[in-house]
Image (cartoon, rainbow, N blue to C red):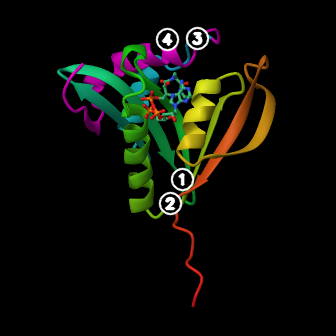
């Protein structure tokens, strides 16, 4: 794969591809809840950003973040298995974090499967802290870890 991935807001044409990627990369073993109609609702929701990464006409990854008054919630993030470890996940998350900051929101929360070591390593690398473990979070059968990141720069000590 060559060339730079292009990131942009998703359109209705991306909904089926996003839903399939969620089914295959995020929801495996849990039942498919992020079907195309649900993704489309997020695309149309003014309080939610759905960002996609494309290269050479192919969708390589996506992220969905919901913005609340004081914080934001990363609902889903996935990159195609053949496109991982090329910085696409980081670029998608940075895009969503910048949008949160632009809206005056300084806190991001998300949940990941406790057993998802790759995702936990990824989020740790990007500055997310693990703040809570919730047993049975996924359909009563699988635990999650909740993570948080403060997007505001730390205040500089005077002097
Ligand atoms: C987690 C995921 C989004 C990462 O996407 P990605 O495009 O591969 O991530 P990046 O290339 O930006 O990785 C940035 C850094 O995160 C860490 N990282 C990423 N994947 C990792 C892995 N499998 N194991 C260990 N560390 C990893 C590394 O430090 C990496 O930097 P490096 O490649 O220079 O070592 C991707 O693996 C994925 O889609 N997984 C399945 C879905 C999922 O788990 N989503 C998150 C929970 S909803």
Q: Nearer the viewer, mark 4 or mark 1?
A: 4
Q: Is residue 158 above or below residue 76?
A: below
Residue 92 is situated, as x and y percent measured from the top left of the image, at: 39, 38
Q: Give me the C-alpha separation between circle 2 and circle 1.
A: 8 Å
Tell me if label 3 and label 2 are in contact, CB under 8 Å.
no
Residue drawn at point x = 65 percent, y = 25 percent: 117
Magenta residues, as a range? Answer: 1-30
Q: Return the disc, 3 or 1, that comes first in the chain's sequence.
A: 3
Q: Nearer the viewer, mark 2 or mark 1?
A: 2
- Where disc 2 sits, the SS reads loop
Residue drawn at point x = 36 percent, y = 20 percent: 83
Q: Return the disc, 4 or 1, that comes first in the chain's sequence.
A: 4
Q: Return the disc, 2 or 1, that comes first in the chain's sequence.
A: 1
Q: Is residue 46 visible?
A: no
Q: Return the disc, 4 or 2, that comes first in the chain's sequence.
A: 4
Q: Give me the C-alpha separation between circle 3 and circle 2.
A: 31 Å
Q: Which residue is mark 1?
A: 68
Residue 42 is situated, as x and y percent measured from the top left of the image, at: 43, 34
Task: Say few, some or many: other residues with alpha carbon within 10 Å of mark 2 (under 14 / 14 to 19 / 20 or more).
Answer: many
Disc on res. 105: 2
Task: Say few, some or many: other residues with alpha carbon within 10 Å of mark 3 (under 14 / 14 to 19 / 20 or more).
Answer: few
In this picture, residue 148 sits left or right of residue 97 = right
Nearest the viewer among 11 and 57 is 57
Quarter of the image where the N terminus is located: top left
Q: Which residue is mark 4?
A: 24
- Where disc 3 sits, the SS reads loop
Tell me if label 3 and label 4 are in contact, CB under 8 Å.
yes
**In which image quadrant can residue 30 be found?**
top right
Residue 58 is situated, as x and y percent measured from the top left of the image, at: 24, 18
Q: Give me the C-alpha separation between circle 3 and circle 4.
A: 6 Å
Nearest the viewer among 96 and 122 is 122
**Total numbered labels placed on residues in the image:** 4
């Amino acid at each position: 794969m060559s060339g730079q991935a292009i990131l942009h807001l998703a359109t209705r044409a991306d909904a089926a591809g996003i839903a399939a990627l969620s089914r295959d990369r995020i929801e495996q073993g849990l039942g498919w809840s992020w079907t195309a109609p649900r993704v489309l609702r997020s695309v149309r929701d003014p309080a939610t950003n759905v960002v996609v990464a494309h290269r050479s006409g192919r969708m390589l990854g996506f992220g969905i973040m919901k913005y609340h008054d004081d914080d934001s919630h990363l609902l889903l993030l996935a990159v195609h298995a053949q496109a991982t470890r090329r910085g696409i996940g980081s670029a998608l998350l940075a895009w969503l974090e910048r949008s949160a900051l632009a809206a005056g929101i300084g806190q991001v929360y998300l949940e990941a499967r406790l057993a998802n070591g790759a995702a936990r390593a990824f989020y740790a690398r990007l500055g997310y802290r693990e703040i809570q473990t919730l047993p049975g979070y996924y359909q009563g059968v699988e635990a999650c870890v909740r993570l948080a990141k403060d997007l505001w720069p730390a205040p500089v000590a005077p002097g």
